[in-house]
Image: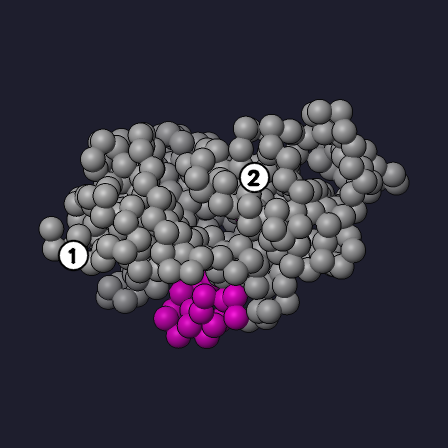
Amino acid sequence: MTHIAVIGAGQAGASLVAKLRNSGFEGDITLIGAEDALPYQRPPLSKAYLLGEMQLERLFLRPESFYAEHNITLRLGTRVDAIDPQRQDIIIGDEVIAYDQLALTTGSKPRHLPASVGGDLKGVHVVRDLRDVDEMAPEVRQGARALIVGGGYIGLEAAAVCAKRGVAVTLVEMSDRILQRVAAPETSAYFRALHSDNGVDIREGVGLDHLQGDAGRVQRAVLSDGSTLEVDFVVVGVGITPACDLAEAAGLAIDNGIRTDELGRTSDPLIWAAGDCASFPYKGQRIRLESVPNAIDQAEIVAQNMLGAAKTYVATPWFWSDQYDVKLQIAGLNSGYDTVVTRRGEGAATSFWYYIGEQLVAVDAMNDPRAYMVAKRLIEAGKTADKTVVANPEADLKPLLKA
């Protein structure tokens, strides 16, 4: 009987094993996860779950009974020590698990502040998994003082949740503007104003120098401009890195993540990768996508390819972020853009359309699902949108789809 093992029990891993069964695979499946909890969705962790609006059970992607009914062996709370590709073995302590094919869906891990600047003090948090959020939840209370380090989407979402709970929030971003790495100045300005209107003190071009504490708990922050802040807790949102330590130690090719081909196969023909940890070919370049849609879509393609389908994974990048009453929807990749066209929709709806020359490559849409859907369909079809039409708030966008 063929045995397929999957290391990493997040969104990608759970999607992959379900697709294996749905595709008719009748062999043994083992899903191994380091966390004790059943595979769960991460986006609500730092929003609805942290706010107490979503219970733990609603986070789970599937009930425990699903895995039993589909004869999927769950190994939760289990850390893999090593992979031996030559022997086709997974090593867990003194235990050895043989596999016929292996999928790595190990995801990503947050960057932490080093201990040298106070990153090991109590009250300093990252936002990545269930344990992180459970530890932080009691801190997010009316009247508390928080420092958010990092002005990317992780930091901004944390700032929004804290502000909604009555926390006095200061956010520092060492770059010239928030979202500088991922968005146009127009999008940065939009979210800077949104957070300022909600009482968040945003300081751009200012980083954290170090944290100070008493009895092992953080009490104040010294910033790069010499100013100090009294703080009750700190949230660190300075990015994530692909979790590819196991793959690298096993001798697999690494290239901003676990390097795969267009099928999802790694440099070892019996090992595959999907989700945040995997880099793959895309339009003549190599990318890695940190998103739920990519984790699901790529994992399902890999599952089929493990069974011989030989399907090329064609990514359709899209993302979202919820902050206060604003839903940001992003389609495409804006790298290399040279022009941004602003479209004002009805009410507070706004979208920013990214172009390289005359070619539409991405869109950021705030509370404007209609503009987002049109732009997303155009980008996926390789079409563009006339800039004058996009900029005209009175113009109907739907005819662009027929052009």
Q: What residue type is labelled 1?
A: Pro
Is the residue marked by circle 1 packed among few (<14), some (14-19), or many (20+) residues within 10 Å? Answer: few
Relative horizontal placement of residue 73, taking residue 178 as reference (left or right):
left
Q: In which quarter of the image is residue 148?
A: top right
User: Image height check: is 58 above or below 133?
Assistant: below
Query: Which residue matches tag 2?
Result: 151
Q: 90 and 224: which one is in front?
A: 224
Q: Which amino acid does label 2 sit on?
A: Gly
Query: Is residue 356 within the magenta segment?
Result: no
User: Image height check: is 18 above or below 275?
Assistant: below
Q: Which stretch appears magenta?
A: 58-83
What colour scheme does the image use?
one colour
Q: In which quarter of the image is residue 50?
A: bottom right
Q: 59 and 138: which one is in front?
A: 138
Dot 2 lies on which element? Answer: loop
Query: Is residue 81 within the magenta segment?
Result: yes
The answer for how far apart the CA atoms under marks 2 and 1 are is 37 Å
Q: Position of residue 197 (x, y in %)?
A: 61, 51
Dot 1 lies on which element? Answer: helix
